[in-house]
Amino acid sequence: MSEGLADRHALLLTVAAADIDDLDHVSNLVYLRWVLDAARAHSDARGFDHAAYRRLGGIFNVRRHEIDYLAPGRLGDRVEVSTWVDPWKRAWCERRTEIVRVDDGRALARAVTTWAFVDLASGRPTRIPDELRAAFERRP
């Protein structure tokens, strides 16, 4: 995945027993949860929590998830979930996420999520405000 000059945000997690499925590795649903958790943490870190989106009158809504599962995560693994937004379009963007096992640097999964920015009143796509885009394009 190409990250260009996009601002990255990372979460460090440890695989817990509740994350493990019947095949004794991290459940596919857990990877999806981590993708969403990282997106929320990135947004919060840039000053856009739910209250900020309400003030803007719009919020991001998932249109599509695509996840490539590359290697199994196991109980006790330390993982880094990094996320960034690239590209930005008028009313939508793609958020890219990479999940890497910290101890050996192996990529466990990569995801691309398409997010539409929607008007809270109508639920219809609307232009992403410049201030929102700028918050995610800058480096902290």
Image (spheres, grey):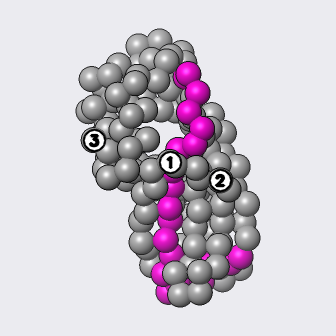
Category of crowding for the residue at label 2, using alpha-carbon neighbours closer than 10 angstroms: few (below 14), some (14–19), many (at least 20) = few
| Residue 15 in view, yes or no | no
Q: Is 15 above or below relative to 91?
A: below
Q: Is 9 above or below relative to 27?
A: above
Percent across and percent down for residue 3 are 59, 53
> In whole angstroms, how far apart are the C-alphas of marks 2 and 3?
25 Å
Q: Is 33 above or below relative to 128?
A: below
Which kind of residue does numbered mark 2 sit on? Ser
Q: Are marks 1 and 2 in contact (CB under 8 Å)?
A: no
> In whole angstroms, how far apart are the C-alphas of marks 3 and 1?
17 Å
Which residue position holds label 2? 2
- Residue range in magenta is 71-91
Task: Report the side of 62 relative to 71 (left or right).
Answer: left
Sequence-earlier tag: 3 or 1 = 1
Quadrant showing the N terminus: bottom right
Q: Nearer the viewer, residue 16 or 38?
A: 38
Which residue position holds label 3? 47
Magenta span has 72? yes
Which kind of residue does numbered mark 3 sit on? Gly
Category of crowding for the residue at label 3, using alpha-carbon neighbours closer than 10 angstroms: few (below 14), some (14–19), many (at least 20) = some
> In whole angstroms, how far apart are the C-alphas of marks 1 and 2?
9 Å
Percent across and percent down for residue 79 are 51, 75
Percent across and percent down for residue 102 are 52, 81
Percent across and percent down for residue 42 are 39, 50
Q: Identify the residue at horizontal 70%, vertical 49% (top origin).
A: 66
Sequence-earlier tag: 2 or 3 = 2
Quadrant for residue 14, please give it.
bottom left
Quadrant for residue 130, please give it.
top left
Which residue position holds label 1? 6
Q: Residue furthest top?
A: 122
Q: Secondary structure at mark 1?
A: loop
Which kind of residue does numbered mark 1 sit on? Ala
